[in-house]
Image (cartoon, helix red, strand yellow):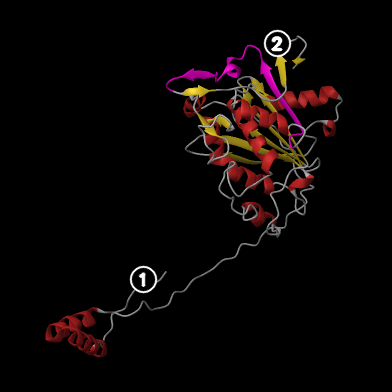
Amino acid sequence: KMSSKPRIKDKGGQLNLGMMAGAMVAGPAGAAVGGILGSMYEGQVRGKVEVELKYTPIPQVDLKLSKRDRYQVKGGLPGVEWGELYEKHVTKADGNAESALAGTDLEFCAFVTHDDTGCSCAIYRILEKRLICVSFRGTCAPIDLVTDATIAQLAWVDGEDVESSDTVKVHSGFRNLLESISRRLKELMLAATAPGEDLSEYDVLVTGHSLGGALATCFVVDVAEYGMDAGRGLPQLEPSEAWWNSIATTLTGKKVQVGVPPPRPKSLKVYNFGSPRVGNDAFCKKFDSLVGNGIDEAYRVVDNQDVVTRFPRTMNALAFGNIGYDHCGPTVLITELGNQISKQ
């Protein structure tokens, strides 16, 4: 941007013009003021700028991603590497990695996080199986403890009357967390498909532990009912923006027909582990109604010694009013290591 104004050497013309304009407005006094302003005016910004540009060629890449190193699973606990356990499980099963869940094509795509809320999740994909996985992070930061301790509720659909007993309500902390990253998450999921393909050809698996399990539950309900609507965060009464004006359109170069509803995955599954209660009875009924009608498979895996799964509790107090919480979806209860796993 040019900002220099070289001084004008001959200001006679603009000086006379300023004096004439000032005299017409305010007589002799105006002529004096006009002359002063005319002498100060330096004209429009002018000059020239020389710019040297260097172009970096885009390297040739395999758009089909047929040749890619296998992703090594990361994460775990002190002394425990989940990736090593996974590899041992694959080898012990039949030695054929292609038959495993991740096959030989597991790829880490993105880690989505919000600086203020701390909400985080990771996106993985397996192109050979056309599978996209989303894993929500559990409680691990001080701000997460504040979220977990909250018991207040918000309307699941923003704008609905939270005071009504018929309104679908969820934990306010869970909803606020997911709202902070949900839109960007959906944009990236739409962009995670291979070139020339779209989400309707992909299975989507959503998971999470503890706090992450609650977020996974909320996210799946949104996608099951409304599709991958990247035009807004979570459900709202206000109309969404056009979901196709997202990063997915930019990255894939696809032209999406205006007016087409948000895409839906080929299948949608959720496995959460140690999830706390998420919402009221109306929310649980909504979740259960979507199982088999948008949610193809849902399991809530619970350790019977895990106290997190017993919260939040239903309360009826003057300070908070009547706040109800309940679990939703089929439960897989782990009673003791080595014992038979019971499913309810």
Left or right of residue 95: residue 58: left
Viewer-side label of 1, 2? 2
Left or right of residue 116: residue 126: right
What is the secondary structure assignment of the residue under circle 1?
loop
Q: Which residue in the protein does label 2 denote?
A: 335
Give coordinates of residue 265: x percent, y percent: 74, 43
When asked about the image quadrant of residue 219, the answer is top right
Disc assigned to residue 129: none
Question: Which amino acid lies under the numbered mark 1 shown in the image of this protein?
Answer: Ser
Q: Going 71% across and 59% down the picture, which residue do you hit?
A: 257
Residue extent of the magenta highlight = 294-319
Left or right of residue 13: residue 321: right
Question: Which amino acid lies under the numbered mark 2 shown in the image of this protein?
Answer: Thr
What is the secondary structure assignment of the residue under circle 2?
loop
Residue 240 higher or lower than 70, as above or below:
below
When asked about the image quadrant of residue 19, the answer is bottom left
Q: How crowded is the residue under tag 2: few (<14 C-alpha within 10 Å), some, or many (20+)?
A: some
Q: Residue furthest left?
A: 28
Is there a contact, CB below 8 Å, between mark 1 and mark 2?
no
Name the N-terminal-most of marks 1 and 2: 1
- For the question of whether residue 93 can be seen, the reply is yes
306 falls in the magenta region: yes
Give coordinates of residue 137: x percent, y percent: 60, 30
62 falls in the magenta region: no
Q: Going 32% across and 76% down the picture, which residue do you hit?
A: 5
Give coordinates of residue 289: x percent, y percent: 72, 31
Q: Which residue in the protein does label 1 denote?
A: 3
Give coordinates of residue 275: x percent, y percent: 62, 23
Q: Quadrant of the N terminus?
A: bottom left
Number of marks drawn: 2
When asked about the image quadrant of residue 91, the answer is top right
Q: In which quarter of the image is the C terminus?
A: top right
